Each structure stands twice: as C-alpha cells, then as structure tokens.
C-alpha cells in the first residue's frame, strides 16, 4: 500500500484549512441534509438504536433501497437476498473487489479514476487495466476499451455519473461495456453515488437495467451525496443473491456492521418525495452554471459537467501548464483550493494542466470563490 499513503482529498483539505482558502477541492457540501433525515437519526439515537444492526443492514433501509430502485428505474430487487448495506460506497467497492478478485485477476477501470478503486484493486492483489477518458469531451474510445479486456478480466468497474469529469455515460457506451463484460464473463460493478445529480437533458442509466446484464451486475450507491451527509458513511449495493452473499462475507470482516442509528434515517431520505430529488438537481445545476461562468470569466477553459458536483477546467489559457503546482499555489494566489486531475490518472500527461473544482457549496461561497479566482488573470 506504499503508493497509497495519503489521499489527494485529505492533502488539499489540510492545505485549505492551513491557509484559510475556500475549499473547492474535496467534494463535500457545506450545508446539512434534509431536516427529516437529521430528526430521524437523532430519534434513532435517543430511541435506543445504538447497538450492532443486522449484518445485511436494518430491514427498513434494505426495503427502502429496493423501493427506490423500483420507483426510479423500474427494478425488482429482493430486499432480503439482494441488498447489502455498507460503510459508504467506499466499503461497498472494496468488499466487492475483495470478494470477486483473486490475485492476478484483471479489473477494467476508467482514468481519471476515483482513488479508492486503485487502492481496493491493489488490496486484492488484482491488476488494473486502464481506459483513458480524454479532455475535453471525455468520450469512450472503443478500440482502447476492447484492448483492456482479456482472458483474466474479472470485473469492469464503471462510475456514472463520473467523478471527476462529470461525464454521464450514454446508452451506447454502457451497452458496449456490457457486451464486452458478457463476452468475457466479467462482473459489472457500477458506482452510481451521483445518480441524482444529473443536469440538462442527461439521464442516469443504471447498467443493471440493460438487457441481459442484471445477472452479472452489482450496483453501488450511497447516502453521502444525495442527502448531503458524507460523514454518515451509509452506502449500499444490490445485485444477484450469490454475488451479494459473497460481498457480505467480506464485509463482515471489514467492519462487520456500521452506522446503526443512521441506517433508518437514510431509509427516510430514500422515501422523500419527487420534489426533493428535483430540487436537489435544480439547485446544483444553478451552482454548476455559477461556477462554470466564473471559471470562464477568470480565464479557464471549462468542460461543462452533465452530472456530479465537480467541474474540470484547463489552466493553460491562464499560463499554468502544471495542475499539481497550480493547486499547491492556488490558496496563496487566489484564496481557493482545488484538486489536480492528474492525481486521478496513471499517466500524468493525460491531464497535466487540468484542475477539478467542487460546486456543492452555498451560492455566496461560490460567488466569493469566483470573485477571488478573477485575481488570477489580473
Ligand atoms: N465513489 C465516488 C465516485 C465518489 O466520488 C465517492 C466520494 N464520495 C465515493 C465513491 C465514496 O462514497 P462514500 O462516501 O459513500 O464512501
Ligand atoms: N468523493 C469526494 C471527492 O471526490 C471525497 C471523498 C474522500 O475524501 N475520500 O472529492
């Protein structure tokens, strides 16, 4: 694990704290989630739900996950055999990779890649095969994708909507990935933690809804993003009973169980009305536009994200061709913190001058950040 000793998010947050910069680096909201969730959690704590919950998760949350998948995607999920509650999506990813991969097995991932994927694959002794999504459109290259699959491919790990690019994979891309997974007998693992943060005419398409894929797909999501409770670490996964049982066997020796009183509160969140979900996406779209406009005005070139709460910008027009160096200096130059996209890449040249900003912040914070970034070109 020597290459994984510190995460870029922890580093940049420490830098922002040290310098007092506005932290648009690590992605976490600066407001609390819905009142109903907070009340439900505090009722659960005061109502005595403070001991180990059941291994697969409290029934009310597993039921709520199944209903959510029915309501938004028309899926039939058995809450008893096909759902597992985890310590965030992070544990769901780690436990899934550890359950499915033997040393030497290959996992196809997409660069820029969320940092915990590479670490989880390393923990399993598995080998990562990388497909690169390239600035500015981050389109999937079919030849590169085909070349990443081989006889030892065990898993393809997809993240849509995609952190850090904000890309929402379209049906054609997902069908191609699915067809290759089927051809090679690989399990599709999809990280859908930003499923409700999709903008404009974008549509989130869970891979498990594609024809013929449900039997070999594990779908992962989390409460952190949807309900602005990143510190609660409540995630979940669902898929075919046998695969879920294998992941449950691993999870019980990672954390055993987690988040007793927060699990019923997340169940309340998943049951919130359509207006909650509409407002979430509508508010974030406005924040995206505020930040993208501000970044452009400050001199960056911007790739407008269709999903997530991140935007990737190129600093070359401002005269910076090294994103790592810029992110180290940005607090001093402009009082703002951001994350270099090269931290998510094996090949640093694929994203040398790119920087990621998070827009899950109050409007006045974003306005102030944009105002400060304007100093870069002055
Ligand atoms: N996957 C992606 C793509 C993420 O951006 C994050 C970050 N929050 C996670 C997984 C981890 O989610 P959790 O906090 O629920 O572990
Ligand atoms: N997912 C968050 C991000 O991409 C950070 C999570 C973390 O710090 N591990 O910024």
Image (tube, rainbow, N blue to C red):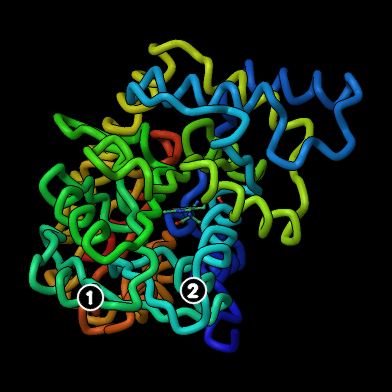
Mark 1: give few (<14), some (14-19) or many (20+) Cα within 10 Å.
some
Residue beneath the point at 16% across and 77% down: 147
Residue at horizontal 59%, vertical 31%? 32
Q: Quadrant of the C terminus?
A: bottom left
Q: Are marks 2 and 1 in contact (CB under 8 Å)?
A: no
The secondary structure type at the circle numbered 1 is: helix
Residue 325 seen in render: yes
Residue 30 is at least partly visible in this image: no
Q: Is residue 312 left or right of residue 266?
A: left
State which tag comes first along the sequence, 2 or 1: 2
Residue 12 at x, y percent in the picture: 51, 67
Measuring 28% from the left and 83% from the top, which residue is drawn there? 348
Where is residue 118 drawn, in percent x and y? Answer: 45, 73
Residue where numbered disc 1 is placed: 148
Residue occupying image coordinates x 29% and y 35%: 209
Looking at this view, name the residue that lies furthest to the bottom: 2
In the image: residue 150, left or right of residue 227: left
The one of 80 and 277 positioned closer to us in this rendering: 80
Badge number at residue 121: 2
Left or right: where does residue 72 sit relative to residue 150? right
Quarter location, residue 353: bottom left
């Amino acid at each position: 694990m020597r290459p994984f000793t510190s995460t870029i998010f922890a580093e940049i947050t420490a830098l922002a704290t040290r310098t007092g910069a506005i932290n648009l680096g690590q992605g976490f909201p600066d407001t609390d989630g819905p009142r109903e969730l907070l009340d439900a959690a505090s009722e659960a704590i005061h109502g005595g739900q403070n001991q180990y919950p059941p291994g697969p998760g409290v029934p009310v949350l597993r039921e709520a996950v199944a209903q959510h998948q029915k309501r938004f995607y028309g899926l039939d999920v058995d809450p008893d055999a096909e759902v597992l509650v985890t310590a965030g999506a992070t544990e769901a990813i780690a436990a899934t990779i550890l359950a499915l991969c033997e040393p030497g097995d290959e996992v196809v991932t997409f660069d820029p890649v969320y940092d915990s994927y590479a670490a989880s694959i390393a923990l399993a002794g598995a080998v990562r095969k990388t497909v690169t999504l390239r600035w500015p459109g981050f389109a999937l290259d079919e030849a590169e994708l085909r070349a990443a699959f081989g006889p030892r491919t065990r898993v393809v790990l997809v993240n849509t909507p995609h952190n850090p690019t904000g890309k929402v994979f379209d049906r054609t891309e997902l069908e191609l990935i699915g067809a290759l997974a089927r051809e090679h007998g690989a399990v599709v693992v999809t990280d859908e933690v930003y499923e409700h943060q999709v903008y404009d005419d974008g549509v989130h398409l869970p891979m498990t809804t594609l024809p013929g894929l449900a039997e070999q797909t594990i779908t992962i999501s989390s409460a952190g993003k949807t309900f602005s409770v990143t510190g609660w670490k409540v995630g979940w996964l669902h898929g075919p009973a046998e695969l879920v049982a294998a992941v449950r066997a691993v999870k019980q020796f990672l954390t055993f169980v987690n988040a007793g009183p927060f699990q019923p509160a997340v169940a309340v969140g998943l049951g919130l009305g359509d207006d909650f979900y509409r407002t979430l996406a509508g508010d974030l779209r406005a924040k995206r536009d505020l930040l993208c406009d501000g970044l452009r005005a400050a001199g960056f070139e911007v790739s407008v994200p269709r999903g997530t709460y991140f935007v990737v910008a190129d600093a070359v027009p401002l005269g910076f061709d090294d994103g790592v160096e810029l992110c180290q200096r940005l607090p001093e130059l402009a009082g703002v913190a951001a994350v270099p996209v090269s931290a998510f890449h094996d090949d640093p040249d694929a994203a040398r001058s790119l920087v990621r900003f998070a827009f899950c912040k109050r409007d006045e914070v974003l306005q102030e950040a944009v105002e400060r970034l304007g100093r870069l070109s002055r």
